């Protein structure tokens, strides 16, 4: 058994000084069948440790419905087999550019601004969750022969609050649940963040992307002794829909990494491999110096401009980091595993069948409710997906402006069955006035919940009301369509598909809906190719939209020999979600910058494969394109968040 401790000036492993060279790799952003390869890439880069968050909302999307916490345990076991130590950051809040910062909507919807505080009811659900989750960590601690050496209490709390009572309670809860390895906190290297987020007796660490000497100097003011560690060295950054991609120069990033190590510090490279926000789990931000201004939803790719790219390939940044890290290695670095191979292609998949959104809602939607005012997504129990609101404009009355106040995030509006416009938070009024009587439908989508800052936990949907001139329209019928409804095996078989030609004759209703098609993969290892076929096959069982499942992923998705991944594009389509063989790849949106969705090789099959496209705004030609995927990033210098 191993004894890992926090010394006065360094970490110690069985009494001997050790430096942690860690990299972030989130098990929930990588298909389980690909964990081994990605962990091997971290080891080959020169790392001796892996760090992961744990998203509460993925594992308990509805209260009491706990799903596959064993995925964390299996990942930690894989890390141990790869020869890596492990750092676990269980939250309950994680940020991570993940939907709602990892907090379930039933938690933020119920407790609102009481989350992340000493509130007794909030603490009760956190304790119940931790007692469900933490056995996966406790039994894999280094003292029991496992890889886990550090566990975090909360996450960047000093960027949010100052409730020392809550933080000390949470640290105590971790101990009560059996965590015996050292606990730590992580915050930005600023006085107010460290005073708000640190806990007496716990190791404080700092998060930054550059300026290590200055950052550690601030940390030392608050923690004169103990090992220095940058718990999040931001080597890249994430992208937002409708904004330019963010890249960081590899040479500059390698220099910043070298500076951290020259300070004698340990490091966790965030991200070593970013992966993908499968299943619509991408979060969102608010702009501005205090993260409380315009809405900025995060793209599906979590490539992060990391040294190991979304496809699992080594980049120029990888090679430069490896050169820096090998100077601190105890021996020769492992060789790189084989580079993943893409689908030989391209192939065009014809989407031969279609069902209107109304029919999809009838087949897969939650029961419709009726109330005086529009219920929020939280009140309806909808985390990811959309809600159809229906309300009547009384009449007769003259035409007045019609809009939605407090809209989050985007609504396609129909008046008497005719498309009348698309509304957003910033533009919440239809371009043309509406006379009464009239029937109004608003199909509202959540584009991802805020994961950082004071707007954490803000509700989705029509959070104010539907207004005709200054008058609220009451008597609202609402019905949710959760993305989770597509995950159940055979669920989509209940959707009444018709030939895709029917969409062209359905007027505005034909511009949206669920489209279906198939393609065939044939070939042997290294030569697999694909061809399109018509959409006649039955729906298969769906793997979890997160990339994890109740059973090892390979049982449902054996993959195709020689095909480690594919890329999927939807030229001419506008906004929606895509599934391959029941596995949700995530959101697509024509505003960019992301054009290609990553398809994990293990979700593909030899023989017939099925594609579903849920278009929410304006469908293109009924076809999608599959190919080998995006090329390795050239890492041209671009904007970067330091």
Image (cartoon, rainbow, N blue to C red):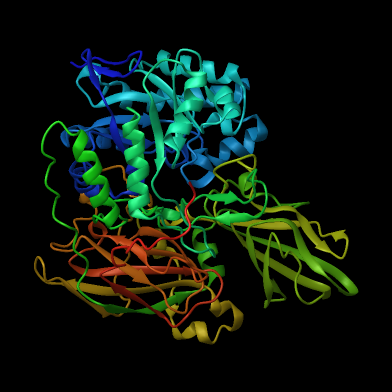
- Residue located 43% across and 65% down the image: 594
Q: Is residue 24 visible?
A: no
In this view of the protein, can residue 459 be seen by the observer? yes
Tell me what residue is drawn at x 62 percent, y 57 percent. 479
Q: Nearer the viewer, residue 385 or 273?
A: 273
Q: Residue at x 64, y 32 (%)?
A: 111
96 w.r.t. 346: above or below: above
Residue 122, percent from left and from top: 59, 26
Residue 640 locus on image (x, y percent): 47, 53
Give the camera-side residue of 606 and 313.
Answer: 313
Percent across and percent down for residue 211 are 45, 38
Of 615 and 375, nearer the camera is 615
- In which quadrant of the rendered view does residue 602 lie? bottom left
Total number of numbered labels? 0
Residue 63: x %, y % from top left: 51, 35
Q: Is residue 329 above or below residue 97?
A: above
Query: In the drawing, does residue 590 fall left or right of residue 562?
Result: right
Q: In the picture shown, does residue 363 fall above or below 543?
A: below
Q: Residue furthest right?
A: 397
State the quadrant of the N terminus.
top left
Left or right for 591, reference 34: right
């Amino acid at each position: 058994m191993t004894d890992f401790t926090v010394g006065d000036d360094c970490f110690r492993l069985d009494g001997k000084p050790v430096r942690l060279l860690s990299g972030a790799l989130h098990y929930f952003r990588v298909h389980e069948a690909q964990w081994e390869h990605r962990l091997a890439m971290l080891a080959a880069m020169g790392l001796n440790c892996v760090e992961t968050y744990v998203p509460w909302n993925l594992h308990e999307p509805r209260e009491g419905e706990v799903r596959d916490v064993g995925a964390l345990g299996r990942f930690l076991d894989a890390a141990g087999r790869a020869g890596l130590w492990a750092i676990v950051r269980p939250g309950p809040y994680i940020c991570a550019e993940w939907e709602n910062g990892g907090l379930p909507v039933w938690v933020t919807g119920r407790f609102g601004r009481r989350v992340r505080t000493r509130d007794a009811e909030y603490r009760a659900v956190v304790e119940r969750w931790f007692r469900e989750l933490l056995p996966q960590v406790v039994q894999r601690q280094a003292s029991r022969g496992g890889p886990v050496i550090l566990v975090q209490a909360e996450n960047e709390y000093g960027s949010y609050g100052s409730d020392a009572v809550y933080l000390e309670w949470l640290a105590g809860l971790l101990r009560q649940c059996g965590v015996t390895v050292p606990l730590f906190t992580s915050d930005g290297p600023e006085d107010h963040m460290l005073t708000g987020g640190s806990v007496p007796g716990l190791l404080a660490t700092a998060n930054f992307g550059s300026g290590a000497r200055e950052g550690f100097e601030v940390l030392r003011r608050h923690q004169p002794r103990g090992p220095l560690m940058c718990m999040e060295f931001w080597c890249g950054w994430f992208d937002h829909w409708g904004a330019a991609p963010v890249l960081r120069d590899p040479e500059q990033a390698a220099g910043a990494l070298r500076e951290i190590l020259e300070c004698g510090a340990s490091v966790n490279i965030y991200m070593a491999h970013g992966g993908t926000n499968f299943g619509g789990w991408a979060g969102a931000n608010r702009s501005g110096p205090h993260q409380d201004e315009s809405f900025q939803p995060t793209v599906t790719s979590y490539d992060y401009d990391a040294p190991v790219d979304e496809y699992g390939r080594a980049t120029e940044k990888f090679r430069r980091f490896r050169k820096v890290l090998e100077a601190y290695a105890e021996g020769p670095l492992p060789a790189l595993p084989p580079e993943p191979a893409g689908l030989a292609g391209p192939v065009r998949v014809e989407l031969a069948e279609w069902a209107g959104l109304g029919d999809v809602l009838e087949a897969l939607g939650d029961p419709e409710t009726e109330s005086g005012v529009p219920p929020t997504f939280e009140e309806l129990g909808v985390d990811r997906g959309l809600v159809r609101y229906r309300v009547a404009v009384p009449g007769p009355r003259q035409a007045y402006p019609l809009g939605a106040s407090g809209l989050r995030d985007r609504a396609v509006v129909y008046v008497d069955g005719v498309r009348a416009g698309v509304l957003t938070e910033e533009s919440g009024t239809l371009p043309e006035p509406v006379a009464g009587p009239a029937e109004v439908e608003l199909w509202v989508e959540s584009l991802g919940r805020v994961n950082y800052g004071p707007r954490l936990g803000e509700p989705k949907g029509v959070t104010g009301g539907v207004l005709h001139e200054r008058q609220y329209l009451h008597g609202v019928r609402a019905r949710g369509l959760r993305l989770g409804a597509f995950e159940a095996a055979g669920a989509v078989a209940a959707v009444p598909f018709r030939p895709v030609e029917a969409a062209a004759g359905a007027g505005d209703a034909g511009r949206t809906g669920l489209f279906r098609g198939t393609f065939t993969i044939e070939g042997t290892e290294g030569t697999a190719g694909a061809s399109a076929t018509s959409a006649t096959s039955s729906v298969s069982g769906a793997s979890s939209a997160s990339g994890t499942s109740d059973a090892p992923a390979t049982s449902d998705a054996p993959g195709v020999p020689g095909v480690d991944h594919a890329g999927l594009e939807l030229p001419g389509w506008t906004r929606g979600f895509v599934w391959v063989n029941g596995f949700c790849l995530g959101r697509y949106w024509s505003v960019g910058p992301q054009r290609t969705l990553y398809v994990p090789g293990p979700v593909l099959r030899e023989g017939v494969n099925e594609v579903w496209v849920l278009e929410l705004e304006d469908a293109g030609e009924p076809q999608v394109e599959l190919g080998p995927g995006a090329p390795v990033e050239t890492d041209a210098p671009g904007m970067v968040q330091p």
